[in-house]
């Protein structure tokens, strides 16, 4: 556990898959983690982080961005339309573009501000009713409509169903990205990032394996 070990495992998985060293970007998922754990990883020199909640990220990251030049912040949690404006100002990439209403909102914001974070379309590869994401059958049309709106779609993202082998989901996402001419593949978490790298991940999102288990209990 820890940044050095996980970075080493990412490099080893790249090599095993015949990929270039450093080709895969490691997103350290810092949601809910105590400040001292995040600061330790910043002090080790890591600069790419993922957060799930706009409010939490807005409270924590402006100060760290000022202290640690080069920080890059990616939004990996569900994005409410009414938080899109804050998110566009705070994040360098959004991995959870998952519905037409959010695409329309982001397109309006992009036009007004003349800039937009890189966008990944989240695909619900397991077609799970409770999970966010575009259904696989609808992904090609959704990607095309986002491009028509001028949105900078750079890749696809998925969260495979819990308790299932992730590999078929990673393979499906890779095929979907290839046929849509997309290079970005945001897939793989603490339990399956090596498999994701074998299947072509460009970004892996690793939280607990770097920082330790998350404690969601309210702190006193
Ligand atoms: C929390 C989260 C992660 C990190 O999960 P770990 O199992 O702690 O690595 C990755 N991706 C998404 C979308 C998450 O919400």
Image: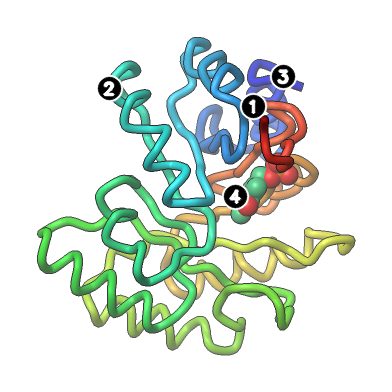
Tell me which residue sits at (66%, 37%) in the image: 207
SS type, badge 3: helix
- Residue at image mark 4: 201
Q: State which tag comes first along the sequence, 3 or 1.
A: 3
- Asked if one can make out residue 196 in the rendered structure from this viewpoint, the answer is yes
Q: x and y percent of residue 45 in the render? A: 47, 14
Identify whether 171 is placed above or below 26. Answer: below
Q: x and y percent of residue 87 in the render? A: 34, 54
Mark 3 → mark 1, Cα distance in angstroms: 10 Å
Tell me which residue sits at (51%, 37%) in the image: 25
Tell me the crowding category of disc 2: few under 14, some 14 to 19, or many 20 or more residues within 10 angstroms, Cα based. Answer: few
In front of the other: 210 or 24: 210
In front of the other: 196 or 69: 69
Residues at circles 3 and 4 in contact by the CB criterion of under 8 Å: no
Q: State which tag comes first along the sequence, 3 or 4.
A: 3
Residues at circles 2 and 4 in contact by the CB criterion of under 8 Å: no
Identify whether 138 is placed above or below 68. Answer: below
- Residue at image mark 1: 11
């Amino acid at each position: 556990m820890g940044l050095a070990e996980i970075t080493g495992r990412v490099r080893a998985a790249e090599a095993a898959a015949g990929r270039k060293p450093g080709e895969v970007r490691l997103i350290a998922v810092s949601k809910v983690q105590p400040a001292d754990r995040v600061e330790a990883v910043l002090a080790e020199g890591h600069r790419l982080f993922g957060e799930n909640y706009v409010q939490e990220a807005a409270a924590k990251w402006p100060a760290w961005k000022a202290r640690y030049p080069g920080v890059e912040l990616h939004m990996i949690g569900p994005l409410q339309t009414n938080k899109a404006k804050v998110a566009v100002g705070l994040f360098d990439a959004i991995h959870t573009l998952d519905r037409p209403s959010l695409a329309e909102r982001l397109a309006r914001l992009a036009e007004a501000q003349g800039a937009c974070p890189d966008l990944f379309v989240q695909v619900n590869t397991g077609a799970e009713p409770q999970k966010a994401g575009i259904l696989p059958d609808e992904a090609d049309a959704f990607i095309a409509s986002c491009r028509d709106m001028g949105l900078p779609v750079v890749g696809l993202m998925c969260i495979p169903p819990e308790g299932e082998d992730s590999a078929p989901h990673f393979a499906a996402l890779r095929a979907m990205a290839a046929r849509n001419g997309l290079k970005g593949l945001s897939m793989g978490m603490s339990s399956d990032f090596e498999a994701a790298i074998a299947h072509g991940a460009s970004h892996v999102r690793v939280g607990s394996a770097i920082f330790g288990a998350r404690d969601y209990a309210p702190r006193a």
